[in-house]
Image (spheres, rainbow, N blue to C red):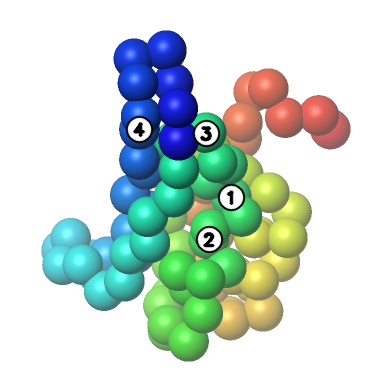
Amino acid sequence: GRSRGGLSTKIHMAVRGLGCPVRFTLTAGQKGDAPQAATLIEGLSAEVVMADAAYDADHLRQAIAAKGALAVIPNNPSRAL
């Protein structure tokens, strides 16, 4: 994607507890983070799913709960309630 500094790319990654990569996807820099999460966690088993505030979305929390896992995601302060 294009930013003020030029073209940019984001790397979205699912890792195991010790940081070993399991799955990743690349997107344009201006794309949102939360829409990528479903693809990253699909088919993976976990007891806990941790993510940063950019992944704070109800649909993601529901998908994690449906897997029987605990979502540890801080609230995004700019998110509409």
Contact, mark 1 vs mark 2 (Cβ under 8 Å): yes
Q: In which quarter of the image is the C terminus?
A: top right
Residue at the spot x=42%, y=82% of the render?
A: 44
Q: Mark 4 and 2 residues: CB-CB less than 8 Å, in contact?
A: no
Which comes before the other along the chain, label 4 or label 3?
4
From the top left corner, tell me how far across and down residue 63 is, in percent.
Answer: 66, 71
Of pointers 1 and 4, the one earlier in the residue sequence: 4
Residue 62's spot in the image, x, y percent?
71, 66
Q: In which quarter of the image is residue 50?
A: bottom left
Q: Residue 37 carries which label?
A: 2
* Number of the front mark, 1 or 4: 4
Q: Alpha carbon of mark 3 to alpha carbon of mark 1: how far? A: 12 Å
Residue 10: mark in rendering: none
Q: Is mark 3 on a helix, strand or loop?
A: loop
Mark 1: amino acid: Ala
**Would you say 55 lies left or right of 10 here?**
right
Crowd class of label 1 (few under 14; some 14 to 19; many from 20; radius 10 Å): some
**Looking at the image, which residue is at 45% across and 43% down?**
28
In which quadrant is the N terminus drawn?
A: top left
Q: Name the residue under label 1.
A: 34
Query: Disc 3 residue type?
Result: Gln
The answer to whether the residues at label 4 and label 3 have Cβ atoms under 8 Å apart is: yes
C-alpha span from label 4 to label 2: 19 Å
Label 1 – label 4 distance at C-alpha: 18 Å
Residue 29 drawn at (x, y percent): 44, 36
Provide the residue designation for mark 4: 8
